Image (tube, rainbow, N blue to C red):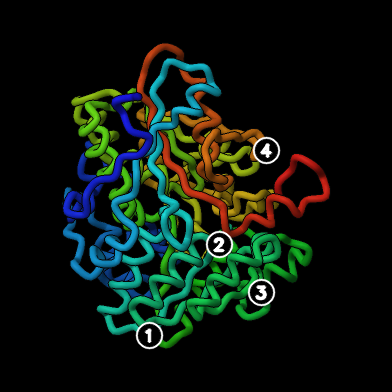
Amino acid sequence: MSKIPHRLYLTEDQMPQKWFNLRSAMAEQPDPLLHPGTLRPLGVDDLSPIFCEELARQELDGATAYVDIPEPIQNVYKMYRPSPLIRAYELEKALDTPARIYYKFEGNNTSGSHKLNSAVAQAYYAKMQGLTGVTTETGAGQWGTALSEACSYFGLTCDVFMVKCSYEQKPFRKAVMNVFDASITPSPSPTTEVGRQILRDHPETTGSLGCAISEAVESAVQSGGAKRYVLGSVLNQVLLHQSIIGLESKLAMEQLGEYPDVVVGCAGGGSNLGGLIAPFMADKLRGIRNPRIVAVEPASCPSLTRGKYAYDFCDTGRVTPLARMYTLGCGFIPSANHAGGLRYHGMSPILSKLYHDGYMEAVAYEQTAFLRRRCSLPSGKPSSPPLNLPTLSGGPSTRLCGAGRAARPRPSFSASPVPGTLI
């Protein structure tokens, strides 16, 4: 019997009580967000009409290394955290590799993913501000599910604009969101001005996260101050909340006497990847250790590997701030792949800066090429990292990747008329 268990759970009292701000370890900060009208750097007052005030402050704070996790958020986290670190013995056998492969499993919650980590935080800050509800976008539906659940905990309404192709592919996601009394609208929709304009210009569009973001922002701005917009990825504040993934991973690996030589994560907008790599990238930036950091993105939306590093709007309707990031262009509409949460034209400004400066690698894969030898069905998003493992340099090493699951939208795996494809 191996000395290393298949699963390692930290105890409840070992769960981190602070989030880690990766920007505090960066010698050169990402370029600032720009106002869409003036093209000047934004301040908290500029962001507050769109975001909750505390979240606006977190968005612009590049100096504070650790941020206290409020006790009400910790109490919700304890319903599903700490999440397990899993030794992928069967995957190692399938790959015939001497490497020790671990993955951080974030699927032990209703959303089936890491998304709840930031959803709980953003819903809490909205409640503390006295708002009645929030608006948001969702791709595959995991973020919408997570936010719907978080809003129900704190007594908020939740208006979700779901990318049209995923809205049609994943009815079970809608059903779960409805359990938490969320309002779900396929995007683009005739309910907003930006949605109507997109439909006039592209009547057959399958939608995109950029489209859905535009509609959610418009809906929040027109609420008369009762609601704010919240985002499930890309933003600095989201990577801050998701750092709990990497902090738990590092502590668990330390208990096993391990440190990863390679850290691999899926990359859509950057929330999963940014959260997983945060403490390991900090070690790399500070010269403490030198792990390889690898982003794995979908070939249908390869912002890092084929995008341009430039200022661009974060949404299709051009109503959001501009961020300097790797982008395929805010008007880019990717193909309707299964991993809907990865269908975003841009990338986190933090991760974009790190990739541009050479601290991180990136590869792109087709969605049908993934396989995981585990007793669970992984979602299309986190299945990409283990797919990339065979391409990494051989020899004994320790590799870490992130994972969720796709149990709830499973009909979308089987509904395609073409065998061996996903929709």
Q: Nearer the viewer, mark 3 or mark 2?
A: 2
Q: In terms of secondary structure, where does tag 3 sit?
A: loop
Q: Amino acid at mark 1?
A: Thr
Q: In terms of secondary structure, where does tag 4 sit?
A: helix
- Name the residue tied to disc 3: 189
Q: Are marks 4 and 3 in contact (CB under 8 Å)?
A: no
- Name the residue tied to disc 4: 368
Q: Amino acid at mark 3?
A: Ser
Q: Position of residue 146 (x, y in %)?
A: 44, 65
Of 60 and 265, nearer the camera is: 265
Q: Which mark is residue 132?
A: 1
Q: Nearer the viewer, mark 4 or mark 3?
A: 4
State which tag comes first along the sequence, 3 or 2. Answer: 2
Measured in 3D between alpha carbons, the distance from the residue under mark 2 to the one under mark 1, in whole angstroms, is 22 Å
Of 62 and 394, nearer the camera is: 394
* Mark 1 neighbour density, 10 Å: few (under 14) some (14–19) many (20 or more): some
State which tag comes first along the sequence, 4 or 3. Answer: 3
